Amino acid sequence: MSTKSEVYIFSFLYLVEMNMNLESIRSNKAGMILRFSIPSIIAMILTSLITVADGFFIGNFVGAEGIAAVNLGLPIVYLYLAVGLMVSVGGVAIAGMALGGGDTEKCNNVFNQTMTTVVAASVLLSIIMWFCLDPMLGFLRTDAVVAGYFTGYYVIMLLELPIMVINASFGMFIRGEGKPQYFMKVNILNVLLNILLNYLFVRWLGWGVKGIALASLISAVVTLICILYFFAKKSSVYKLRGFAFSKEVLRNTLLNGGSEFIGEMSLCISIFAYNYVILKNIGVDGVTAFTIVGYVAYVFSMIVIGFGQGSVPLFSFTYGAKEYSLTAGLRRITNRMVLISGAVVFVLVLIGSRWYGGLFVDSEAVEGLVRSGIALFGVSFLLSGVNVISSFYFTSISKAVESAVISSARGLVILLACICVLPPLLGMTGVWLVAPVTEGLTLFLSLLFIRRDSLNIGILHRVKVW
């Protein structure tokens, strides 16, 4: 779990580490973007591998209904992320500012209060969600097979999800201490262990979706042990200890992390709407096909976010130095990179569309839906990169309104409108068109904001995206 706010808060660490200066950026803009982005891209792809691996094992050893069942519960996952991010991003910002001001006592108080709040909130959420699983299934009107898989999987995940949120929150403080390499190694261990346990529990022991959930739980526990070891033995700043509770810190924490909560809740709502509309108009096969295509979209989004994370420090540094033309140039080069990446993924999608669905399920109906729709959905890869980078860009130069509008448009407002209109009119074709139409309409907003920003700083008289 890595966010724009987290990257923005700690971008100065990368600047210091890279000994960056304006001349080095000006002389090698593309090289600097890649230098900052590639580590983030690798980390993001590692994160996405767990989801894809889970889908592979569920599809091949459980079936299409298993994939659909897991996808139906994704709003639950995003709800945990919303709460966890709101607390942890807000807390890590306050702790970071205290650390920068030399107040280590306040820094550690905020750290311990933040982590205690994360633990309490996530555990409470699991208790509440325990009573919400059956009503959720009733509202979605799923069949008995899917409902059985859903319950079997998410009963275990209600134990795993709090640990996942706690691990991610601890990870922010590890990076804030300037030790990102340690957390990256822990994440690699998490991915490898998860895949190994998936293979053992599902392929050999035949535990199905429960085995997938149990693999996630064990991997999360091992990751937590490694993280606790760091704070017990290796941490030089943040120490686990008692703290004096502060209402002011809690209030500021929730306010600082409010935008992250809104962002994740938007995903929660949109995924739930997707599932409801697809189930109502197409059925379980439609949800399964949408999930399989979504794996490609997820991996691509991780690549784009990696570029965004790498470019944020460069945008902030050059804009703060009033080198506006240089900032705009960095933005255009980053846009070209994500456009090329999108084009490559789109071509690969076209080439592999006939066999891709068969990697996950042995169902002619689902494979046919994937083949017929993946090319339509893939058009969004050519558009989404610019929107994501534009949102990162405006965040990095402290123009939160523009960033929020772009994120809200593509993640909730325009997206929900398209979900409610296109699938009922066009069936599964409408499902595939939701993403490209949403990204296309959002692109107009991105271009409008870029033009206005360019005119305000007096560097352009027309829009230059590329």
Image: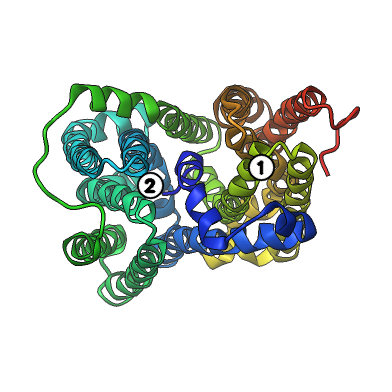
Of badges 2 and 1, the one in the foreground is: 1
How far across and how far down the image is residue 132, in percent?
Answer: 24, 31
In this orientation, does residue 425 appear? yes
* Callout 1: SS: helix
Residue at mark 1 = 389
Residue at x-position 26% and y-position 40%: 103
Q: How many neighbours does mark 2 have within 10 angstroms: few (below 14), some (14-19), or many (20 or more)?
A: many
Residue at x-position 58% and y-position 60%: 19
Is residue 329 shown left or right of residue 419?
right
Is residue 428 shown left or right of residue 162?
right
* Callout 2: SS: helix
How far across and how far down the image is residue 140, in percent?
Answer: 38, 31
Q: Between 455 and 2, which is closer to the camera in this rendering?
A: 455
Is residue 206 shown left or right of residue 346?
left
Dot label at residue 347: none
Residue at x-position 56% and y-position 56%: 299
Residue at mark 2 = 69
Q: Earlier in the sequence, mark 2 or mark 1?
A: 2
| Amino acid type, residue under disc 2 in the picture | Ala
| Amino acid type, residue under disc 1 in the picture | Ile
> How far apart are the two marked residues, 2 and 1, measured between alpha carbons?
32 Å
Q: Between 453 and 368, which is closer to the camera in this rendering?
A: 453
Q: How many neighbours does mark 1 have within 10 angstroms: few (below 14), some (14-19), or many (20 or more)?
A: many
In this orientation, does residue 341 appear? no
